[in-house]
Image (cartoon, rainbow, N blue to C red):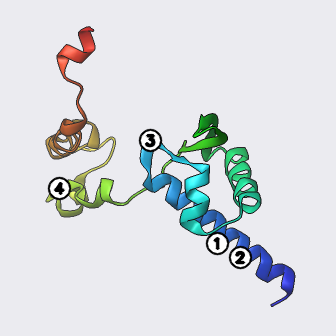
Amino acid sequence: MSTKAKNDEYLLDLTSRVYKVVVEHGNGGVLQSELWKELDLTSRDGSRIAIRLEKRGMIKRDKMLQGGRWTYRLTPLRFPVQIKSIEEAPCMTCPDEERCSPSGVVTPHTCAFIENWVTMDFKPMAIPQKQLIS
């Protein structure tokens, strides 16, 4: 493997690690200076990677004053797709799976199994009525 290929592979791995840490911190984000310490990066290398991720639309960089010094809060704009959201889909074990189609007798549009699965999966995320009024 050439030196350039090794450097490219290293940069890709490092970029993935930075993005993973930002995503792990969730919507609250992480300070750029904390991230560099966590991953043992120089501020120069870390800034370049953060800028690259921002240009790709994967993170947002918000400039802020922290402890008398300027830094950035890095927050994810996109989260990786996770299979957890479809792991328990009822279609995998549905007795009507063979007869199911958009225009069939059994359809995904009117399926009680799918309706129950979706409402159970998203119930914890529902916004209480009081919050909707205020």
Q: Amino acid at mark 1?
A: Asp
Label 1 to label 4: alpha-carbon separation: 44 Å
17 horizontally vs 97: left or right: right
Measured Cα–Cα span from mark 1 to mark 2: 5 Å
Residue occupying the far bottom of the picture: 1
47 sits to left or right of 91: right
> Callout 4: 10 Å neighbours few (<14), some, many (20+)?
few
- Quadrant in which the N terminus is drawn: bottom right
Q: Which residue is mark 3?
A: 27
Q: Position of residue 126 (x, y in %)?
A: 23, 30
User: What residue is shown at x 34% (from left), y 42% (from top)?
Assistant: 102
Label 4 sits on what residue type?
Asp
Is 29 positioned to the left or the right of 5 in the image? left
Precedes in sequence: disc 4 or disc 2: 2
Q: Circle 3: is it few (<14), some (14-19), or many (20+) Cα within 10 Å?
A: few
Query: Amino acid under label 2?
Result: Tyr
Q: Which residue is mark 1?
A: 13
Q: Secondary structure at mark 3?
A: helix
Task: Report the mark closest to the observer, 3 or 4.
Answer: 3
Q: Position of residue 46 (x, y in %)?
A: 69, 59
| Res. 10 mark | 2
State which mark lies toward you, 4 or 2. 2
Furthest residue toward top = 133
